[in-house]
Image (cartoon, rainbow, N blue to C red):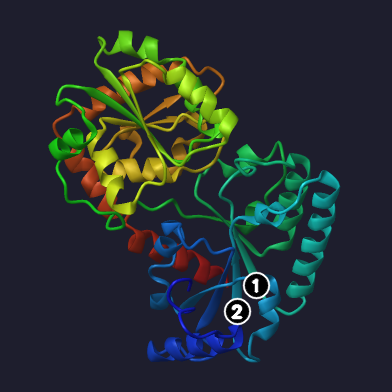
Amino acid sequence: MKGVRHLGFARTFHEECLDASEALATRGFNLGEGKLLAVHPYGHRNPFLRMLYASAFDFGFAMMPLTNLEQLSEVPAGLDLVVHYHWVHRIFDDLTTASAARVAVGQFLDTIKNLKDSNHSFVWTVHNILSHKSRFPDEEAELRGEFAQLVDHIHIMNPQTVALCEPHYSLDLKKIFHVPHPSYCGVYGDYISKEQARLTLGLRPKDKVFLLFGELSPYKGTRHFLGQVDTLQNEMNGKARIVIAGQEGSSDFMEDIYRLTAGRADVQLHIGRIDDQDVQTFFKAADVAVCAHTAGLNSGVAATALTFGCPTVMAEQMAGTVEGADGYISTFEASEMETIVSACANAFRVSQQPDCFEVLALWAKEYAPAQISTRFFEALGQRL
């Protein structure tokens, strides 16, 4: 893996497969029982993948990042390999025109068909209806629809995924298995107090703090939420404090954010990459986390917030992605952004319940990465 395997020596995928098979053998899984799980694309900075595969070896799977699909030609004979695909839209990363995107779709699908002829099994996790920053929505919808027909199994985290994707492409119910998004229990640092977190951010103990966390991009709904802050202040008797933290977006978008927040003492901006050890500062300081985006399937931010004991505001269509925390999610109507104010007010009331933190701590343990990973591999193993 990046930062580990590539320090000082290069390894072929063939060699990694042999090592993975040997590692499975130490767990008692022979060639007919153990399976290699080739993951593509593998995001080294995204903890979700490590969380999802936490229990892999317990179920006879050895996870290996797959840099490109061409590496599959290097798999040693006799080894059983499963390809787990995630963000399929990445085939468009370096493209600038719709015509090039259409060509890329055809080439990619042909590659998958050829690989299927080599008896590789394919699993796809559907993270989004379309990618958040989709530049080629028509081509991407075609890609997803055709890919859904080719893969053997489809993993969803939001039970509404099929219905939400249907206007764009279809998913075969027979291929689908549902395993929810895990909590982030044990993933981020979690050792400072709420008081210290607020002191660090310059927030007072009685402030009513609403956090918008994550990359600053148009799809996040930040601009629309900021348009409701005055109404929220009326609801919160002027005590609302808005904290916005995340990686800087495009220059045009950031100009809008700076304009909307200029001169506002009730809004803090923390622009830049947030270190893993600083994640706790923002979520522990907050009373409520606000996921203001109106389109999407799943939210790692919501799962992170709930892990830190922070009730969450989400669009109605996304609420199902976080299983088991219904009473701590307040929803708004995606088509009516003004409803986010009442959702925020309700979430704040929930945050003041005496047992809020304790209940969510129990939720985080129940949905910890190892627990959800176990559910994932149990479900996948039954299908292979």
Pinpoint residue 94: horizontal percent, then vertical percent.
71, 54
SS of the residue under disc 1: strand
Q: Quadrant of residue 186?
A: bottom left
Q: Circle 2 sits on which residue?
A: 81
Front residue of this view, candidates 174 and 55:
55
Q: Is residue 266 visible?
A: yes
Pinpoint residue 16: horizontal percent, then vertical percent.
53, 85
Q: Quadrant of residue 119?
A: bottom right
Instruction: Estimate the spatial distance between the alpha carbons at disc 2 and disc 1, rounded to whole Å.
Output: 7 Å
Pinpoint residue 266: horizontal percent, then vertical percent.
31, 19
Front residue of this view, candidates 265 and 54:
265
The answer to the question of whether label 2 and label 1 lie on touching residues, with beta carbons closer than 8 A, is yes
- The circle on residue 159 is none
Tell me if mark 1 has few (under 14), some (14-19) or many (20+) residues whose alpha carbon lies within 10 angstroms of its own: some
Q: How many marks?
A: 2
At 65% from the left and 43% from the top, the residue drawn is 130
Q: Circle 1 sits on which residue?
A: 121
Q: Is residue 184 visible?
A: no
Amino acid type of the residue that numbered disc 1 sits on in the rendered structure: Ser
At 56% from the left and 49% from the top, the residue drawn is 127
Q: Is residue 72 above or below residue 205?
A: below
